[in-house]
Amino acid sequence: MKKLEEYIRDVPDFPKKGIIFKDITTLLKDKEGLKRAVDELYKVVKNMEIDKVVGVESRGFIFSPILAYKLEAGFVPVRKPGKLPAEVISESYELEYGTDTLEIHKDAIEKGDRVLIVDDLIATGGTAKAVCKMVERLGGKIIALEFLIELTFLKGRDKLKEYNVFSIIRY
Ligand code: AMP
């Protein structure tokens, strides 16, 4: 049987020189690849009694609602500035060059909600850390973070020591 990582395509120098982009579209378009990726992600978190799955724009929006549906939980989007229509809170984080900001609706999480944060990939962990901060500011309890892909050499986990971090494919 084909390994799950064999469905993922490496695209060198995208979006800029020196970055090897992990392209999951080759996994998503394959019925076996998509099913296996979702099954693997679900298996890890299925008994965690999750209330809300939080997904990050934009590739984080692919797996998080599928997992929310399977977990019988709600889905909460985290978006880039200016996209969410109602009242938001925001969090900025450092990039290699400059900073980025993410937003979440103020009423998206209720105090004590058991939250799972999902993204396609963890690199430096900066994105995930910003999402954790917003969820906690809203009173959510972070039960776990889950990623399809982890670039272990970037040590994103080190930023998330206080949380349960799971990944399916590690490079
Ligand atoms: P980070 O905040 O450094 O952990 O970056 C994580 C975010 O950037 C995720 O939402 C990924 O989709 C995206 N990302 C970072 N590096 C890559 C890469 N090599 N291939 C694909 N996506 C990436």
Image (cartoon, rainbow, N blue to C red):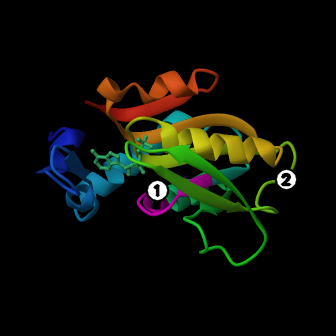
Quadrant for the N terminus, please: top left
Q: Nearer the viewer, residue 8 or 135?
A: 135
The reply to whether the magenta stretch includes residue 133 is no
Please provide percent x and percent y for residue 45. 57, 37
Element under label 1?
helix
* Residue 98 visible in the displayed image: yes
Q: Amino acid at mark 2?
A: Glu
Q: Residue furthest right?
A: 111
Which label belongs to residue 113?
A: none
Q: Residue at x 64, y 60 (%)?
A: 103
The reply to whether the magenta stretch includes residue 58 is yes
Q: Residue at x 14, y 51 (%)?
A: 13
Taking 101 as reference, is 114 above or below it? above
Element under label 2?
loop
Q: Residue at x 25, y 61 (%)?
A: 25
Q: Is the shortest distance between ligand 1 and the CB of mark 2 under 8 Å?
A: no
Please provide percent x and percent y for residue 37. 35, 47
Q: Nearer the viewer, residue 169 or 39?
A: 169
* Residue 140 visible in the displayed image: no
Which label belongs to residue 110?
A: 2
The quadrant holding residue 89 is bottom right
Q: Earlier in the sequence, mark 2 or mark 1?
A: 1
Rate crowding at label 2 as few (under 14), some (14 to 19) or many (20 or more) other CA atoms within 10 Å: some
Are circles 2 and 1 on residues that touch, CB within 8 Å? no
Q: CA distance from mark 2 to mark 1?
A: 21 Å
Rate crowding at label 1 as few (under 14), some (14 to 19) or many (20 or more) other CA atoms within 10 Å: many
Please provide percent x and percent y for residue 20. 18, 45
Image check: 100 left or right of 90?
A: left
Q: Which residues are magenta?
A: 54-62
Q: Amino acid at mark 1?
A: Gly
Q: Residue at x 38, y 47 (%)?
A: 97
